[in-house]
Image (cartoon, rainbow, N blue to C red):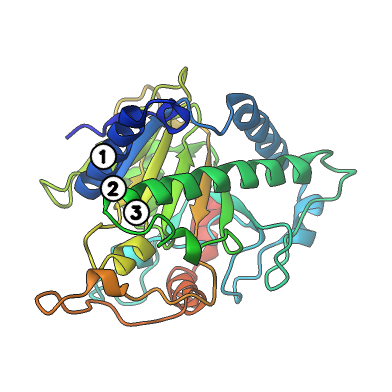
């Protein structure tokens, strides 16, 4: 099971056949695997490199510069700095209810930001004196990724023989977010003991996601032909591939026609020494506008195939899912020490 690589240059190609072929392969890969990889993305490599440079500087800031922008975990949407071990992705897909008072955590810290004009969940930025240019870089990256996701959504709609705007009319990227992850060096034995992971198996909440894995590639995806088995996501650093992932909102809108891609971040399968190396990643979560319903669209409901999901607003769904992996009863000490 190999995830296809598509040349996104076709999006701007003059040949209608080229664009049609791209749409066909995009839809086929996302429907079959839940993933596809793009080369020659409109998100320019210099901007990606600049963003990686900035996030590395952010995570090296003194604690005193990050504490004023710490994430409020009681909110429905993350903003600012999520401290090491704060997020518990184990609860999203691995919790079957058989373990009492589970203590499973993520060995990472992260930073989240959204649309610059978001008044419901305003962005939190480090002081310009502490990290010059950080906000400006993140905002350019946000809009560049957002533009790409809208083009991809229209391509998917056209391939499904639907109105090109069926998805984008419900998504202006007002609720979309950037997530940057930092995975500090960690002892291999910590990740191998089974109660701490870099990121546990999970599905993204939004419509589609763009992942820029960075230099240390530990992203893994579920082999749908062998459920529960995960395969390393091949990644060509030189070509700066972008991984596109189907999210839960797309699965709900299409009434299960397109299934969200289950994935995780693991340690390298083959490594030397006892320390798992440091890692960074960039993720853009393309999300439905908050007032939009994320139940099945009428185009995907028939007499033979009833609606599989209830109608909720995108904000209600985000709140529900976010609460799942920020449980009240947590033990920060273990994961904080592991990080």
Gap in angstroms between the C-alphas marked 2 and 3: 5 Å
Nearest the viewer among 67 and 192 is: 67
Res 38 seen here: yes
Where does label 3 land, which residue? 157
Residue 143 image position (x, y, % from top left) = 64, 46
Q: Quadrant of residue 290?
A: bottom right
**Where does the N terminus fall, quadrant-wise?**
top left
Mark 2 and 1 residues: CB-CB less than 8 Å, in contact? yes
Please give the name of the residue rendered at 28% of the width and 65% of the height, measured from the top-left corner. 254
CA distance for labels 1 and 3: 11 Å
Front residue of 19/280: it is 19
Other residues around mark 2 within 10 Å, as few (<14) / some (14–19) / many (≥20) = many
Percent x, y for residue 28? 22, 42
Q: Is the residue marked by circle 3 packed among few (<14), some (14-19), or many (20+) residues within 10 Å?
A: some
Q: Residue at x 53, y 33 (%)?
A: 278
- Comparing 302 with 65, the one in front is 302
Are the residues tagged 2 and 3 within 8 Å (C-beta)? yes
Which residue: 36% across, 70% down? 102
Q: CA distance from mark 2 to mark 1?
A: 6 Å
The circle on residue 159 is 2
Q: Secondary structure at mark 2?
A: helix
Up the image or down, 224 lies above or below 302; here it is above
Q: Is label 3 in a helix, a strand or a loop?
A: helix
């Amino acid at each position: 099971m190999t995830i296809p690589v598509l040349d996104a240059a076709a999006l701007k190609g003059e040949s209608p056949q080229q664009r049609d072929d791209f749409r066909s392969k995009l839809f086929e890969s996302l429907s079959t695997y839940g993933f596809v990889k793009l080369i020659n993305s409109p998100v320019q490599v210099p901007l990606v490199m600049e963003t990686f440079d900035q996030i590395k500087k952010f995570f090296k800031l003194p604690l005193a510069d990050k504490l004023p922008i710490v994430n409020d975990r009681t909110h429905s949407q993350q903003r600012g700095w999520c401290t090491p071990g704060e997020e518990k992705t184990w609860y999203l897909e691995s919790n079957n209810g058989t373990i009492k008072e589970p203590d499973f955590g993520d060995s990472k810290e992260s930073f989240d930001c959204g649309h610059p004009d978001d008044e419901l969940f305003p962005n939190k930025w480090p002081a310009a004196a502490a990290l010059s240019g950080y906000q400006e870089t993140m905002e350019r990256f946000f809009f560049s990724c957002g533009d790409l996701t809208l083009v991809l959504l229209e391509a998917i709609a056209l391939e499904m023989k639907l109105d090109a705007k069926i998805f984008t009319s419900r998504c202006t990227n007002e609720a979309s977010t950037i997530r940057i992850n930092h995975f500090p060096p960690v002892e291999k034995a910590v990740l191998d003991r089974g109660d701490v992971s870099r990121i546990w198996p999970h599905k993204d909440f939004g419509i589609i996601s763009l992942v820029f894995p960075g230099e240390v590639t530990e992203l893994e995806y579920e082999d749908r032909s062998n459920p529960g088995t995960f395969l390393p996501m091949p990644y060509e650093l030189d070509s700066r591939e972008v991984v596109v992932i189907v999210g839960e909102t797309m699965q709900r809108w299409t009434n299960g026609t397109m299934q969200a891609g289950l994935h995780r971040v693991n340690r390298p399968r083959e490594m030397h020494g006892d320390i798992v190396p440091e890692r960074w990643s960039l993720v853009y979560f393309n999300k439905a506008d908050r007032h939009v319903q994320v139940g099945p669209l009428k185009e995907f409901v028939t007499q033979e195939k009833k609606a599989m999901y209830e109608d909720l607003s995108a904000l209600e769904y985000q709140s529900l899912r976010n609460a799942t992996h920020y449980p009240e009863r947590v033990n920060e000490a273990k994961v904080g020490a592991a990080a």
